[in-house]
Image (tube, rainbow, N blue to C red):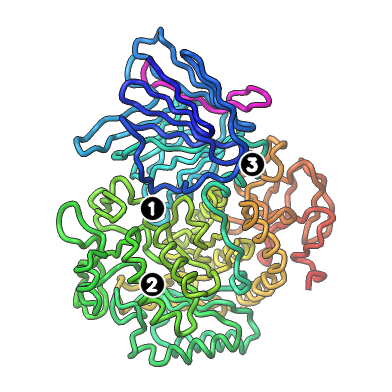
């Protein structure tokens, strides 16, 4: 027997021990939750309060119910003829009745579409299964290293790793978006026979579904539900300079001064890891950085912001370690000591275990921010690099973590989001303007705290560059409008090697059209990870005269594009539409636009075709139907819906602008 219990905004369904709720959650959107006995009172997911929307229309009978909320209809059916009947949900487009998504049983007998297997702790292994649809295309799910844009056919872990950012939101070409609002470690399978979401340990099934007529509208609904990004600060759209590590204040200032001497644009320069006295001190080492206030003042005078790297690791040699430990501010361990990584920090003769602070704990957020405010913000530093914020575990066992928010198996994936929250809340309390929090990881809702993501410690290879194009588009479709890569890749690259110089040029040409424009990497000669690292040269003049001439031109091109980029960032803040996006977001009626994964739009008026193969001096470019396009290098007009072979000499990549646009790129008129 099934029973239905409607209320003004929710339908509750009870069958045996299961409680299932469907709740209006924003325009054309619902939140579905299911649990044994009762819905948990506390959730650590991304859905805090439902956005305002018209109330739903709910009807129910003996064995069925209907929940109509704008353009999304949820039908509930209970088939008494089944061997083990259960209520099953089907999501439809209200205006047409077309099926968007439907639950499907794992087996005709048992289990059903929703599966709970207890572990005697009050938690469960959970599955949620939906039907698979031939030809369906699925996009998003954060940032991955598989090199695909369409996720159909893939099985993916829902866990945070260096370079693998798990944001469990997918956008379907069938006209819906789905957020798996469960921060537990798990996986998702987009198979030909079913789509199945899985968590190894959780208290409930919790997901959000939206229907909208276009991909852009789906992204807008998702931003309304999980939070809008703030507007990008004016300084952040320029060029960011970094190498593995500038070891001293003098080294860093010398690079900034050289940029100024050469007349090169520069917005941000980075004091990377090991600038500190010890992990967990959160202050400059006075032996290497004797007057950081004067350094910040000199940089500010020439229009440059200083970004500092802040790791969530706490060394047992830190002056604050006892406080962190005794106040319960560290991530705990289900088994063993509270140390989840090893590194050779200052004062260590060899790599030693270090702990992580717990940003899900409000007391930790207050304690860490007090240190950051005193030692960085009060010096005028307002740009923070939240590195290793997955957190990066050794061994990689998030299930061994215990956090204020709960067991690691249930909540570990929210760590990077709450780490960004620490800084966003601290800045707001200090009355400071919002900043960019460059984070190596993120979860659903990270964008509302000003989190930007870069693609992690990637190889310095052509294959890696190819992967970055899809990675950036995927995370853009997952709600993160601020994204960048280590231009040139992170691991390796020899500035003296002509082959690598070509890769660096092509990567810069891609990077100038990314939301954030940033050079970083551990160049040859490389050394093992420790406080003694510095890495090879990685300044724009490090790669020879030919490369320097091209790269310096790209820095000036970026300056010309900054007003246009900020227009797109304002749109992103208001609507959730990311500036870097696949063709189908703007041209959903063009079937070919859903297939292209190596060309992208930079705002509505600029189409970018990166060159990702060595020696290539031309490439094919598909121009979507519905607009005319102007070759930015030649001025030739091409009608959309065609594929052209575009010239790609070493000094430029193919770029097209929408006919009628005022944007200028490669032509001299742009200056």
Magenta stretch: dominant secondary structure: loop
Q: Nearer the viewer, mark 1 or mark 2?
A: 2
Q: Is residue 432 above or below residue 649?
A: below
In x, y percent, where is residue 349?
A: 19, 77
Tag of residue 215: 3
Q: Position of residue 48 (x, y in %)?
A: 47, 48
Q: Which residue is mark 1?
A: 414
Residue 557 in the image: state x and y as whole percent.
Answer: 69, 70
Q: Residue at x 40, y 59 (%)?
A: 418
Task: Please report the bounds of the magenta region as a residue range.
Answer: 92-108
Q: CA distance from mark 1 to mark 3?
A: 26 Å
Crowding around mark 2 (Cα neighbors within 10 Å: few <14, some 14 to 19, many 20+) is many
Q: Residues within 10 Å of mark 3 (few under 14, many from 20)?
A: many
Mark 2, secondary structure of its residue = helix
**Relative to 362, is 239 above or below?**
below
User: Mark 1 Cα within 10 Å, few/some/many (few <14, many 20+)?
Assistant: many
Q: Quadrant of residue 84?
A: top left
* Displayed quadrant of residue 376: bottom left
For marks 1 and 2, the one nearer the N-term is 2
State which tag comes first along the sequence, 3 or 2.
3
The answer to whether 253 is drawn above or below residue 112 in the figure is: below
**Relative to 273, 383 lies left or right:** right
């Amino acid at each position: 027997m099934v029973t239905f219990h409607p209320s003004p905004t929710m339908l509750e369904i009870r069958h045996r021990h299961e409680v299932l709720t469907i709740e209006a959650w924003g325009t054309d959107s619902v939140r579905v939750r299911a649990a044994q006995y009762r819905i948990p009172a506390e959730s650590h997911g991304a859905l805090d309060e439902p956005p305002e929307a018209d109330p739903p229309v709910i009807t129910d009978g003996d064995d069925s119910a209907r929940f109509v909320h704008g353009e999304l209809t949820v039908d509930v059916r209970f088939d008494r003829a089944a061997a083990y009947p259960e209520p099953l949900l089907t999501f439809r487009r209200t205006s047409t009745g077309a099926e968007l998504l439907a639950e499907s049983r794992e087996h005709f007998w048992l289990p059903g579409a929703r599966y709970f297997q207890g572990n005697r702790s009050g938690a469960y292994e959970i599955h949620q299964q939906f039907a698979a649809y031939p030809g369906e295309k699925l996009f998003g799910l954060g940032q991955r290293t598989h090199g695909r844009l369409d996720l159909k056919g893939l099985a993916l872990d829902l866990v945070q790793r260096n370079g693998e950012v798990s944001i469990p939101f997918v956008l379907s070409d069938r006209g819906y978006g789905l957020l798996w609002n469960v921060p537990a470690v798990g996986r998702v399978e987009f198979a030909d026979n079913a789509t199945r979401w899985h968590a190894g340990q959780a208290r409930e099934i919790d997901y959000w579904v939206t229907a909208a007529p276009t991909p852009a509208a789906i992204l807008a609904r998702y931003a309304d539900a999980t939070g809008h990004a703030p507007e990008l600060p004016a300084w952040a759209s320029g060029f960011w300079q970094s190498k593995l590590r500038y070891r001293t204040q003098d080294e860093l200032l010398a690079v900034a001064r050289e940029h100024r001497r050469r007349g090169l644009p520069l917005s941000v320069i980075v004091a990377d890891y090991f600038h500190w006295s010890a992990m967990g001190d959160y202050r400059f080492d006075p032996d290497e950085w004797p007057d950081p206030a004067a350094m910040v003042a000199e940089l500010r005078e020439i229009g440059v912001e200083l970004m500092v790297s802040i790791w969530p690791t706490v060394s047992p040699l830190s002056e604050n370690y006892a406080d962190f430990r005794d106040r319960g501010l560290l991530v705990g361990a289900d088994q063993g000591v509270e140390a989840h990584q090893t590194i050779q920090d200052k004062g260590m003769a060899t790599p030693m275990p270090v702990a992580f602070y717990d940003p899900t704990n409000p007391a930790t957020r207050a304690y860490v921010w007090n240190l950051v405010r005193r030692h960085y913000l009060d010096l005028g530093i307002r740009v923070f690099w939240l590195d290793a914020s997955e957190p990066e575990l050794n061994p990689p066992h998030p299930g061994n973590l215990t956090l204020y928010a709960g067991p690691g198996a249930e909540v570990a994936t929210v760590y990077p989001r709450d780490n960004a929250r620490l800084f966003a809340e601290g800045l707001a309390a200090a009355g400071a303007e919002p900043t960019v929090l460059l984070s190596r990881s993120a979860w659903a809702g990270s964008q509302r705290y000003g989190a930007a993501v870069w693609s992690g410690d990637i190889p310095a290879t052509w294959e890696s560059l190819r992967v970055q194009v899809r990675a950036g588009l995927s995370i853009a479709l997952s709600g993160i409008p601020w994204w960048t890569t280590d231009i040139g890749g992170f691991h390796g690259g020899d500035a003296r090697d002509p082959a690598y110089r070509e890769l660096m040029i092509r990567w810069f040409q891609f990077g100038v059209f990314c939301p954030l424009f940033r050079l970083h990497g551990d160049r040859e000669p490389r050394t093992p990870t420790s406080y003694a690292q510095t890495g090879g040269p990685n300044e724009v003049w490090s790669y020879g005269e030919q490369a320097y001439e091209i790269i310096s031109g790209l820095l000036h091109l970026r300056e010309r594009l900054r007003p246009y980029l900020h227009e797109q960032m304002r749109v992103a803040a208001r609507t959730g539409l990311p500036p870097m996006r696949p063709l189908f977001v703007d041209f959903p009626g063009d079937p070919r636009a859903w297939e292209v994964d190596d060309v992208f739009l930079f705002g509505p008026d600029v189409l970018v075709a990166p060159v990702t193969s060595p020696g290539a001096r031309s490439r094919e470019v598909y121009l979507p139907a519905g607009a005319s396009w102007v070759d930015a290098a030649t001025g030739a007009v091409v009608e959309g819906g065609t594929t052209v072979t575009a010239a790609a000499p070493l000094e430029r990549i193919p770029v097209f602008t929408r006919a009628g646009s005022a944007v200028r790129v490669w032509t001299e008129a742009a200056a």
